[in-house]
Image (cartoon, coloured by chain):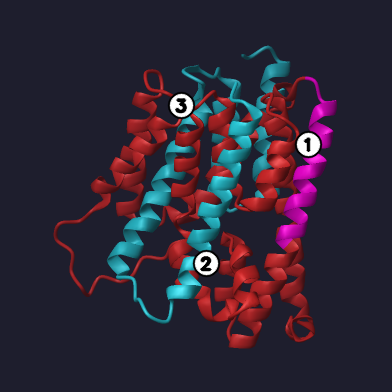
Amino acid sequence: MTTSMTLVIATVVLGVGTYAFRLAGPLLGDRVDLAPRVEEVLNRATVVLFTALVATTALFAAHDFAGYARPAGVAVAGALAWRKAPFVVVVVAAAATAAGLRLLGVP
Amino acid sequence: MRSIWRTLDRELARDIALVCVADGIVGASLGAIAVSEGLPLWLPVLLSVVVFAGAAQFMFVGLVAAGGNPVAAVAASLLINVRHLPFGFAVGDLVGRGWRRLVGSHLMVDETVAFALAQRDAEQRRAAYWAGGVGLLVCWNVGVLLGVLGGTAISDTDAFGLDAAFPAVLLALVLPSLSTAATRRAAAVGAAIALAATPFLPAGLPVLLAVLGVVAGLSPRRRSTEPEEAHA
């Protein structure tokens, strides 16, 4: 496990970096006009990252298969989100599905 | 500042309040997940104050809890937050200047930007941005704190399915952005790369590699008349 001091430094670096991204737009907004093509690629990279994170965390615990209950819960959440169910319903359904399956003995 | 609360119409205030409550619950899940993964109690609390970006915090907590390299965790989380750069160009005039710019920039999250841009006139946009930003900052941090405290009272969070809540939260957030075929193609290729790499590479790296999937979304024959894509 990473030491506390390392975690504090990492958190502060992440905070400062995030703040820099946030501040850059309003500061430069008047002068620079970001090409729509560049903006689109930036947006798409974020969506791709999210999707990859969803896929890996739904299916893996560290380097191994996470079991069936977790991906089943995520699949239920995906179906509900696809049908535009409220966010809270989506999240609670995911947890309830995984918890219910585990209660039934599914790993 | 007072004019902002006067400008804010009742329906908008109610919508913002609803999102604040929902995000508070997500914050609570972040706090509980972080603690259940064995991370120190102060970490999600400090993260929520200085980073204040849900997805990046989930990314960071997830990667660090998985034993990932902190440098890779910061890099992956920062990459997620790069989107605030184009956001800033979109809401720069709402943020203002001087001290307002310094404070207002920190309030820049997906929800505040989305709420602001959905309003018609400039005053409502500014009111939505600031009311949403302050409301979310408060609810998010209170939620995380409650999650941290409540999470420690729960011995086995997997029994409550909290591990499934994390990808579910991100999925619900990302789904509306998968609106075009090009983005879906890029996301599918990226996810496939990450899944193939996960058993072999250090935690964090597979997700960074997934960005290569963006290449799959690039169209070589792109007409300038093609309509702009909408992104969350």
Visual hue assigned to chain B? red
- CB of mark 2 within 8 Å of CB of mark 1? no
In this figure, what is the number of numbered marks?
Answer: 3
- Secondary structure of residue under mark 2: helix
Q: Which chain is cyan?
A: A
Instruction: Using a 10 Å C-alpha cutoff, classify the residue at mark 1 as few (fewer than 14 neighbours), some (14 to 19) or many (20 or more).
Output: many
In the image, is residue B111 above or below residue A74?
A: below
Residue at image mark 1: B148
Camera-side residue of A61 and A86 = A61
Q: Which residues are magenta?
A: B136-155
Q: Earlier in the sequence, mark 1 or mark 3?
A: 1
Chain ID for label 1?
B
- Residue located beneath label 2 in the image: A23
Q: Position of residue B116 (x, y in %)?
A: 59, 74
Q: Residue at x 59, y 27 (%)?
A: B65
Q: Secondary structure at mark 3?
A: loop
Magenta: main secondary structure: helix
